[in-house]
Image (tube, coloured by chain):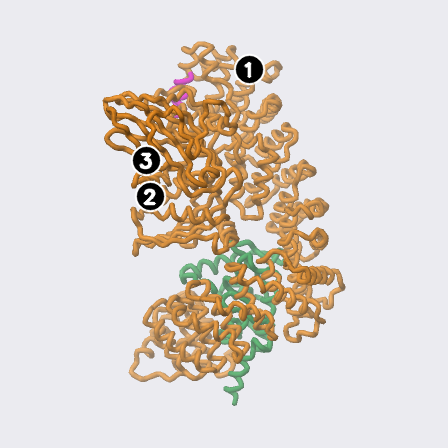
Chain colours: A green, B orange
Amino acid sequence: MIKFVLMVNRQGQTRLSRYYESVELNRRAALEADVVRCCLSRKKDQCSFVEYKDFRLVYRQYAALYIVVGVTDSENELSIYELVHNFVEVLDKYFSRVSELDIMFNLDRVHVILDEMIQNGHIVETNKSRILAPLTAIDKMADG
Amino acid sequence: MPAVSKGDGMRGLAVFISDIRNCKSKEAEIKRINKELANIRSKFKGDKALDGYSKKKYVCKLLFIFLLGHDIDFGHMEAVNLLSSNKYTEKQIGYLFISVLVNSNSELIRLINNAIKNDLSSRNPTFMCLALHCIANVGSREMAEAFASEIPRILVAGDTMDSVKQSAALCLLRLYKTSPDLVLMGEWTSRVVHLLNDQHMGVVTAAISLITCLSQKNPDEFKTCVSLAVSRLSRIVSSASTDLQDYTYYFVPAPWLSCKLLRLLQCYPPPEDGAVKGRLVECLETILNKAQEPPKSKKVQHSNAKNAILFEAISLIIHYDSEPNLLVRACNQLGQFLQHRETNLRYLALESMCTLASSEFSHEAVKTHIETVINALKTERDVSVRQRAADLLYAMCDRSNAKQIVAEMLSYLETADYSIREEMVLKVAILAEKYAVDYSWYVDTILNLIRIAGDYVSEEVWYRVIQIVINRDDVQGYAAKTVFEALQAPACHENMVKVGGYILGEFGNLIAGDPRSSPLVQFNLLHSKFHLCSVPTRALLLSAYIKFINLFPETKATIQEVLRCDSQIRNSDVELQQRAVEYLKLSSIASTDVLATVLEEMPPFPERESSILAKLKKKKGPGAVSVTELEDNKREGGELNGGADRGPDTAAMAASNASTPSPSADLLGIRSSAPVGAAPTSAGNLLVDVFSEAGPAAPSAAVNDDGFLRDLEQPTETSDSLLVEGSGDSDSAPPSEDPAPPLSEADELLNKFVCKNNGVLFENQLLQIGIKSEYRQNLGRMYLFYGNKTSVQFASFTTTVSCPGELQSQLNVQTKPVEPLVEGGAQIQQVLNIECLTDFSDAPLLNIKFRYGGALQNLTLKLPVTINKFFQPTEMASNDFFQRWKQLSQPQQEAQKIFKANHSMDTEVLKAKLLGLGTALLDNVDPNPENYVCAGVIQTKGQQVGCLLRLEPNAQAQMYRLTLRCSKDSVSRRLCELLAEQF
């Protein structure tokens, strides 16, 4: 099961966080800081999977942005690693060349996209056009 | 402004976000946020009704602020209002806010439920999805009550849109996890399983998560999913890379779905149906074949997706552990990955191979990669990969390669990362012991270990080497010689001094013939280290000195001189001072004979599981030590397996707690330094109780401590030993009446002893019956003390122990008849030897008959022999615990009770009871610190039953929920019954 998805930049600022297990607010900040420290300190040639407490982190870096996914051992690490990439590709398609700013200014939409892909900590959809279907429908309504 | 939001962008929000971005300091940011919060608050409180757009904008700002790490304590009502909007974006923000800031405010939940109800019946698929999603995210009890019956209908209805089905599947999963009692799958089971056949891949992807969870809980009801999953997988695997259109990812057809299907199959054993199995094997072979084909794309995404499926397929092959051909192919494939340039693949391959090593079919194949793995240990740049390499070396070790692997691990230890040194030390110690053919090699290895990584050598490790040396007389001389040489080093680790002190104190005589290691040389060598050592070590050395006086009378004067000097006899440390004073006195007044008796060589330690292994299990998750390994170890190293944390100090503890302090008290020198007494259930402690508190009738000298239970293991079939069985009444029993039925309070009396072993079982005006008992493995010994409270003699006193009904074949209880006369005011003792053959629920009966002033007394009690007495505590880490917990997920393996507290709910009281139960109380396992979790293994002659326990107190309601999961269902039930009476 996926426990959380985080998007953080190199400065350690959280740009997106989605928890699939309830974590108290004050513990979230500490967890995020710790997770980010753990991933940022790693070098390029180190492996993308990190044992962290009783679960694992799978992370992937895009320019200055890190996407970190916390998973239990019932998940396949490589498939999560590629899920992250799929997510980024969907964002890229929607925002046509996504940047950190797009994510900040369109947080609601990024959440819609993420919610289409992962629900309750489980992968539900991987097909890009179906992931984007609700958003394209809204955008059409707004344009029209 | 740098970026604009898409669609119907909210300008105010964009401005606010830009402002935050431009803040130069944290203070400025907080100031800006507070200003905004005040603004939003005033807007929400204002007289003017806000339109949907403004509400959405402000709620969105609140979300953003929340994300920055600030608590949000208002706006919930406005978010709820948004739910009833007809605009998707407004509704979506409302739901998002509620999902992210879950609040159990019941009034709000009612309003939210209302909105959800409306959306579910709206037949607008996007609205339905939002509503389902919200239920899935909040998942509260109230929501489950309101919607649990509705969701399965939506999930399987023919006219439901695909996207709604997906959300419904995940929603149902969440409700099933939080409130399983409300989700009744019965009639829906078959239709849910058939979602695996749905033509829409997204639906299948979502449904698998649900089906996997349901299958883990109810494997039988859902086992039809196996054949459906196999055929689905087969269709995907054999499809061309373009067939699945948008579900193809970099030329790999449906990689995520494939992984999930393979995971689902891991919930079940290999398919029984030959055709299904054939098809599955074909799939697995195709996946393995594809790994060898040239890649269809150079992109890393392609190979990652392909390998994700491959690793999952290998996991399934390992899970089945029945296809030698596939296992060996999997091993070869992983072997290729070991040298791959992608670190991720090397990491995963090492990890996967670690599980492969424990399969008998692939163990040999894994071993062929030893050089590569050793190389990885030496050259990998990432410590987590090196750690995996060390794990794999440990897993692939056997008698044939143990020397090589141990040598490599030792040399790696010199440069190993600090974070993994302790674990490496434990592993080396275990391997060295497990595969030692030649014990001088074992001794060398451990001494090397102390030399290289002394700081990381825990007490368990050096206790263990001492136990083994003591138990094996063929290695004692070598050990003495080797420690003597090791101590020559100018700077040697304190642990080395401890081992040296102990071994020379016991076996120094074996090397004393050589003038280079004459008694005085040995003594001077040890004493040269003395002043640099800590108090516990110095205490141990003092004990070694007194043993020297016994072994080598010629050293007596020198040693007495040392003991007599002020730094010893007036040492500020009480322990050291006492030892110095007592040893000095002992050496001067005791005759040689007395000295020789007091300081006799240590008897061999009883066999028990290696405490090092226990420690490693505690440190590491399941990958490190499996149960089979543990059993292997027992078999192979049987004669060495003494337990450091319980056994060795029994003698010392017993003696030192006896009423007259004897200087032999802690010859082991461990008392002051070792955490031996830490476990309250420790056998050592119990034995002490028997010694010190037993009534006048307890013949303390007759109990030989170290072999306490040994005679039980080989029951002597002599004629006088009475094998007590159902009706096996002794023919010498003059009172001929049948045994009385058990007292009405017998069960209550029994319950008092579930969590303790000693105490008064029964008392009336005539008679008092006290109990002391001790259990080890599947054996137990119980002392019954019958006290005559009157001043008149009891005549024809007979006691009979019987095992009614099926208990006869479950428990073997042996005892000898007691003396038929009990004088007034006297106490007699009876010893029962108990052997647990298999798990049991009833208690043996104790019938007592005697004549008091002519009247026949006849009473029957239940003996407090309960199944939990045969617990061996098992320490384990959190992930290990939960993994096992999940493995014991069949409904019959679980027993649960919710009950009112009958006793104090005080933490310490509860802890004491749970420890008394015999299990290990595990800290930091349950996410809720209020809860208690315990683990233990019940040892019976025939089998071991693993038990996990969770106790959730609710102090407010004065209630408990108790859950037990055991590998045997009858044990779960019995333990649950017993324990529900304890709290």
Q: Position of residue B121 (x, y in %)?
A: 43, 80
Whether residue B666 is in magenta: the answer is no
Q: CA distance from mark 2 to mark 1?
A: 53 Å
Residue in the picture at 52% in, 88% down: A143
Question: Mark 2: which secondary structure?
Answer: helix
Labelled disc at residue B740: 3
Mark 3 vs 2: CB contact within 8 A: no
Prevailing secondary structure of the magenta residues: helix
- Chain of the residue under label 3: B
- Judged by depth in the image, the label closer to the viewer, 3 or 2, is 3
Left or right: B156 in relation to B582: right
Marks 3 and 2: same chain? yes
Q: CA distance from mark 3 to mark 1?
A: 68 Å
Please name the residue that numbered disc 1 is placed on. B519
- Judged by depth in the image, the label closer to the viewer, 3 or 1, is 3
Displayed quadrant of residue B849: top left
Residue in the picture at 49% in, 14% down: B550
Question: Which stretch is magenta?
Answer: B569-583
Question: Mark 1: which secondary structure?
Answer: helix
Residue in the picture at 48% in, 36% down: B778
- Judged by depth in the image, the label closer to the viewer, 2 or 1, is 2
Q: Position of residue B286 (x, y in %)?
A: 72, 62
Please name the residue that numbered disc 2 is placed on. B909
* The furthest residue to the right: B294
Q: Position of residue B815 (x, y in %)?
A: 42, 28
Query: Residue flagged by tag 2: what amino acid is it?
Result: Val
* Residue nearest the viewer, comparing A55 with B231: B231
Circle 1 packing at 10 Å, graded few (<14), some (14-19), many (20+), is many
Judge whether B10 appears above or below B650 on screen. below
Left or right: B235 in relation to A20: right
